[in-house]
Amino acid sequence: MACCLPPPLTDDQLSMLIDGVADPELEAHVARCAFCATRLEQARAVERFVHATLQGGCPSPQQLGEYHLRLLAADEERRVRTHLEQCAACRAELEELQLFLVAEPGRSSPIAVSSTLEQRLRRAAGELLARLVPRAPVLALRGADAGPLLAEAEDGTTIVLDPHAHEGEHLTLNGQIIAAGRATWRGALVEARHAGMLIAATSVDDLGCFCLVRVPQGTIGLRISAPDGRAIVLPAIDLPPADA
């Protein structure tokens, strides 16, 4: 069987039909062409299978961010990659999230994120996305300390991160959570990951403080999971060299 109204629909056009954003001409094409109508049904079946493989549908914003940063385990990375090949909506959200994640820390104005992405961030079960606060310009002096890093979560919670030289090229990362409901984060699990691997873990004390040791310099992801199921996620933190 071949397309009776050549050229046959492309994969992108089939994705548009699946997502319900296709032009009327494409709808008319599949209504008259049995070949392209069959391909559309096959594409829908593949998408349903991929959704089932991902246990509940599209990957979460956190998964998309960690996929972009190559922080996922190998099997999870393969599942997300397969899903992205079939889901135009998630590809669009990943592109938008990539713009957000690569924002330069010194920029004075944040990159706008679409309302759709913001809604998905808020729908993520108990997860709060935190963003690093741009540093204020300072006079560059030899040996001057740039000071701690500050991150702010969507609910206004502040995370202070203060890296210090530890051994060789490793760092000690001291942190503190500053929140109105500080008791919420008492005993929270703090995990640091690099290239998808857990590199350090600790817990939050009664004062909201924590300390991660032997953390490598470079880009890490940080997750703080409270006992009640809530979590703060910092997808990308660029740690300075140990002698900075």
Image (cartoon, rainbow, N blue to C red):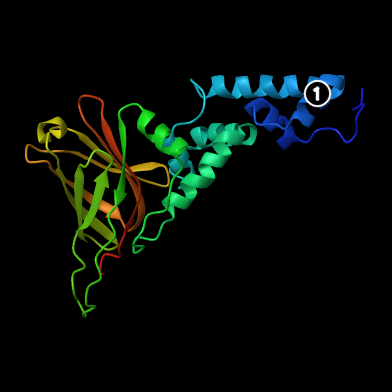
Where residue 125 sits in the image (x, y, percent)?
34, 26
Answer above or below: position of 60 versus 142.
Answer: above
33 relative to 171 in the view: left or right: right
Q: How many marks?
A: 1
Q: Amino acid at mark 1?
A: Val
Where residue 242 sits in the image (x, y, percent)?
26, 65
154 relative to 111 in the view: left or right: left
Which residue is more in the foreground, 62 or 5? 5
Instruction: Identify the residue under disc 1.
Output: 30
Where residue 106 sits in the image (x, y, percent)?
34, 64
Q: Residues within 10 Å of mark 1 (few under 14, many from 20)?
A: many
Q: What's the residue at 80%, 20% (across, down)?
A: 38
Q: Quadrant of residue 30?
A: top right
Which residue is more in the foreground, 216 or 33? 33
150 relative to 61 in the view: left or right: left
156 relative to 94 in the view: left or right: left
Answer above or below: position of 190 versus 99.
Answer: above
Q: What's the residue at 46%, 42% (across, down)?
A: 114
On-image quarter of the N terminus: top right
